[in-house]
C-alpha cells in the first residue's frame, strides 16, 4: 500500500511526488492522460518557487533550461508607462524564469525518476471513499482493468475539473471573466519587436496585449479579442495574430512559425477548504484564476511544498496528525490573495471606457515612477512576500514570515531527506539540548542566528514557525511538543 496516492501528474502533482519521495514516503502518482502536456501553458517560474526548488534539489536543471526575464515594461496611450525591475526582488533568484510548462513537467518527472518513482499513465481515479484510518480508491486502467487501492492519504492534484474535488462535494465558487482571449506561441521580429528578456504589456485602447519571451527565441502572445458570448470559435489563424500585433504593439512587427494558437476564457474560482479528513486538494483543483501575474502554477507548486513535509512528518509518526490542520488555512489565505491580485490586474488591464483608460494610464505612469511601487510589484509577482502570519503553526512576533535565504548559512532548512525544523540561536549548548529532546523534529546542530537576541525555529519549507527572545527555551520546547507527539 502506498502511503500517499496523488491524482494528477501536472506540475503540482509532480512537485508533491518529488517532495514526498525525497522524504522517503511511499507514493504513487497516477494520471489519466497518455502523455504529459506538450504545450507551454504556464510560462513563468518565480523566485519563491526557485528558492523552494533549492530544497528539492532541481534548481540547476531549471536554470539551465529557462530564460531569465529581467522585468516587465508597460505601455499605454502610445508611451512607456514604466514597470517592475525583477533585479529588485530580494532573492538569490532575482528574475522571472521563463520556461514552458511542458519543460517544467519534463524536468520534474526526471527529478522524480531519480527517486525511483515513475508517473503511472492512463490510470484514472473513478471513485473514492474515506474510512477512519484510510482512503479506498478505485482506479481504471487503459486496458479496462479496475484496481481497488487503500491509501493513508489521497491528494487531488487533478486540475480545474478535479474528480477529487467533485468527490468531496466542495463548491468551486467564483465567476468567469467576460472577455475572450487569444493565445499564440510564435516568433516575432521586425521593427518594434520587444527585447527578448522582458515581458511587454501593451494597454491598448482595444484591450490588453502581452508578449512573454520563451527560450529559443520564441514568444507567447496573449490578448483580448472581444467579449465572450458562449460561442466556440476555431483556433485563431496566424493572420489574425499578425493583425492584432500590428494594431496593438506595432505595425513593423512580423509574426511567424506558430507552434500553438488557441483561445481561452478566464475563470476565477476557489474552494474554501483544501482538505476533508484524509483527502487534500492542491493546485488548479483548489484555485483557478487569471494568468495575469503568472501565479497559477507557482501557487499550486507551493501548495505541494507546504503539504509535503507535514505529511512526511505525520506518516513517520514524528508529528501529531494535527500538524496537517495548518495546510488548509495557510494555503487558503494565499489562494485568496492570489485570486484577488490577479483579478485586480485583469480588471485594470481590460478597462474599456476611454476616459477610465486615460485615468489608468496617467495613474500608472505616476505610480511606476516610484521605486517603492516598482519594488512592491516585483516582490508580489515573485511570491517572496507570501507568509503565514495567521497560521495556527506561527507562534511569536514575526512568525510566519519567509526565512532569510540571503544570509542563512548552510543548506536551506528542509534540504535533504529529513523534513526537520532548523533552530537559529545564539546559545549553541541549549540549542543542542533542545535538538536532543526532539530528534525527529529539529536538526541536531543549531545554527547561528543572524538576528542577535532572537531565537527562531524555521520550518522545512523555509518559513519561521516559532520566534522568541534568545533565552526563551521553554516556549520553544512547548512549541515543538505541540507539533510533535511527545
Ligand atoms: C491555455 C492555458 C494557458 C495558461 N497559461 C498560464 C500562465 O501563463 N501562467 C500560469 O501560472 N498558469 C497558466 N495556466 C494555468 C496552468 O497551466 C495551471 O495552473 C497548471 O497546469 C496547474 O497545474 P496542476 O498540476 O494543478 O493541474 P494540471 O496541470 O491541470 O494537471 C492535472 C492533471 O490531472 C490529470 N487528471 C485529471 N483528472 C484525473 C483523474 N480522475 N485521474 C487521473 N488523472 C487525472 C490530468 O490528466 C492532468 O495531467 C494556463 C493554462 C492553460 C490551459
Image: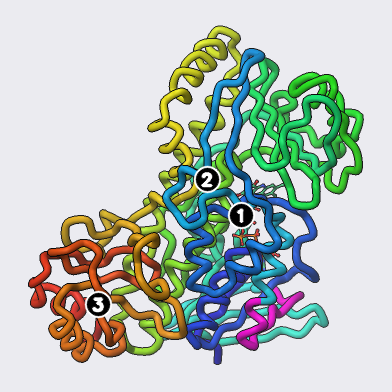
Q: At 53% across and 61% down in the image, what residue appears? A: 50
> Which stretch is magenta?
111-124
SS under mark 3: helix
- Quadrant of residue 222 in the image? top right
Q: Return the disc, 2 or 1, that comes first in the chain's sequence.
A: 1
In reply to whether residue 121 is colored magenta, the answer given is yes
Q: Return the disc, 3 or 2, that comes first in the chain's sequence.
A: 2
Left or right: 420 as drawn, with respect to 34: left
Q: Where is mark 1, residue-wise?
A: 160
Q: Where is mark 2, residue-wise?
A: 269
In the image, is the residue at mark 1 within 8 Å of ligand 1 by its beta carbon? yes
Q: Where is mark 3, residue-wise?
A: 483
Q: Nearer the viewer, residue 32 or 132?
A: 32
Other-residue count near label 2 (Cα within 10 Å), few / some / many at <14 / 14–19 / ≥20: many
Q: At 24% across and 60% down in the image, what residue appears? A: 399
Q: Position of residue 7 (x, y in %)?
A: 61, 72
Q: Nearer the viewer, mark 3 or mark 2?
A: 3
Other-residue count near label 3 (Cα within 10 Å), few / some / many at <14 / 14–19 / ≥20: many
Q: At 60% across and 9% down in the image, what residue appears? A: 354
Q: Position of residue 162 (x, y in %)?
A: 60, 60
Amino acid at each position: 500500500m502506498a502511503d500517499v496516492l496523488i491524482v494528477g501528474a501536472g506540475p503540482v502533482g509532480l512537485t508533491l511526488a518529488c517532495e514526498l519521495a525525497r522524504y522517503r514516503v511511499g507514493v504513487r502518482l497516477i494520471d489519466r492522460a497518455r502523455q504529459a502536456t506538450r504545450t507551454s501553458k504556464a510560462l513563468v517560474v518565480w523566485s519563491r518557487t526557485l528558492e523552494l526548488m533549492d530544497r528539492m534539489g532541481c534548481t540547476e536543471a531549471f536554470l539551465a533550461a529557462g530564460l531569465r526575464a529581467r522585468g516587465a515594461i508597460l505601455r499605454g496611450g502610445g508611451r512607456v508607462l514604466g514597470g517592475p525591475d525583477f533585479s529588485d526582488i530580494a532573492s538569490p533568484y532575482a528574475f522571472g524564469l521563463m520556461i514552458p510548462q511542458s519543460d517544467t513537467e519534463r524536468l520534474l518527472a526526471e527529478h522524480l525518476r531519480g527517486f525511483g518513482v515513475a508517473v503511472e499513465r492512463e490510470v484514472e481515479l473513478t471513485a473514492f471513499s474515506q474510512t477512519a484510518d484510510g482512503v479506498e480508491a478505485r482506479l481504471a486502467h487503459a486496458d479496462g482493468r479496475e484496481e481497488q487501492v487503500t491509501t493513508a492519504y489521497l491528494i487531488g492534484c487533478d486540475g480545474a475539473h478535479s474528480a477529487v474535488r467533485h468527490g468531496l462535494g466542495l463548491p468551486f465558487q467564483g465567476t468567469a471573466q467576460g472577455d475572450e482571449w487569444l493565445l499564440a506561441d510564435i516568433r516575432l521580429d521586425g521593427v518594434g519587436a520587444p527585447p527578448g528578456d522582458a515581458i511587454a504589456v501593451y494597454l491598448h485602447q482595444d484591450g490588453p496585449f502581452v508578449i512573454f519571451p520563451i527560450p529559443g527565441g520564441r514568444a507567447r502572445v496573449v490578448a483580448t479579442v472581444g467579449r465572450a458570448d458562449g460561442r466556440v470559435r476555431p483556433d485563431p489563424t496566424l493572420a489574425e495574430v499578425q493583425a492584432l500585433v500590428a494594431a496593438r504593439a506595432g505595425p513593423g512587427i512580423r509574426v511567424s512559425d506558430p507552434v500553438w494558437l488557441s483561445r481561452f476564457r478566464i475563470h476565477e474560482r476557489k474552494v474554501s477548504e483544501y482538505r476533508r479528513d484524509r483527502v487534500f486538494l492542491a493546485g488548479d483543483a483548489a484555485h483557478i484564476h487569471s494568468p495575469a501575474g503568472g501565479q497559477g502554477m507557482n501557487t499550486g507548486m507551493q501548495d505541494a511544498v507546504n503539504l509535503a513535509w507535514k505529511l512526511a512528518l505525520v506518516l513517520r509518526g514524528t508529528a501529531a496528525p494535527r500538524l496537517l490542520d495548518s495546510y488548509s488555512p495557510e494555503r487558503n489565505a494565499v489562494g485568496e490573495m492570489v485570486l484577488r491580485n490577479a483579478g485586480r490586474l485583469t480588471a485594470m488591464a481590460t478597462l474599456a471606457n476611454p476616459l477610465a483608460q486615460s485615468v489608468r494610464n496617467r495613474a500608472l505612469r505616476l505610480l511606476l515612477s516610484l521605486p517603492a511601487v516598482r519594488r512592491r510589484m516585483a516582490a508580489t509577482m515573485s511570491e517572496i512576500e507570501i507568509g503565514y502570519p495567521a497560521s495556527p503553526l506561527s507562534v511569536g512576533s514575526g512568525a510566519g514570515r519567509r526565512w532569510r535565504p540571503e544570509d542563512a548559512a548552510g543548506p536551506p532548512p528542509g534540504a535533504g531527506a529529513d523534513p526537520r525544523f532548523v533552530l537559529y540561536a545564539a546559545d549553541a549548548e541549549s540549542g543542542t539540548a533542545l535538538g536532543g529532546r526532539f530528534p525527529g523534529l529539529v536538526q541536531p546542530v543549531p545554527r547561528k542566528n543572524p538576528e542577535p537576541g532572537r531565537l527562531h525555529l524555521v520550518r522545512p519549507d523555509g518559513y519561521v514557525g516559532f520566534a522568541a527572545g534568545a533565552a526563551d527555551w521553554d516556549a520553544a520546547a512547548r512549541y515543538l511538543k505541540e507539533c510533535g507527539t511527545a
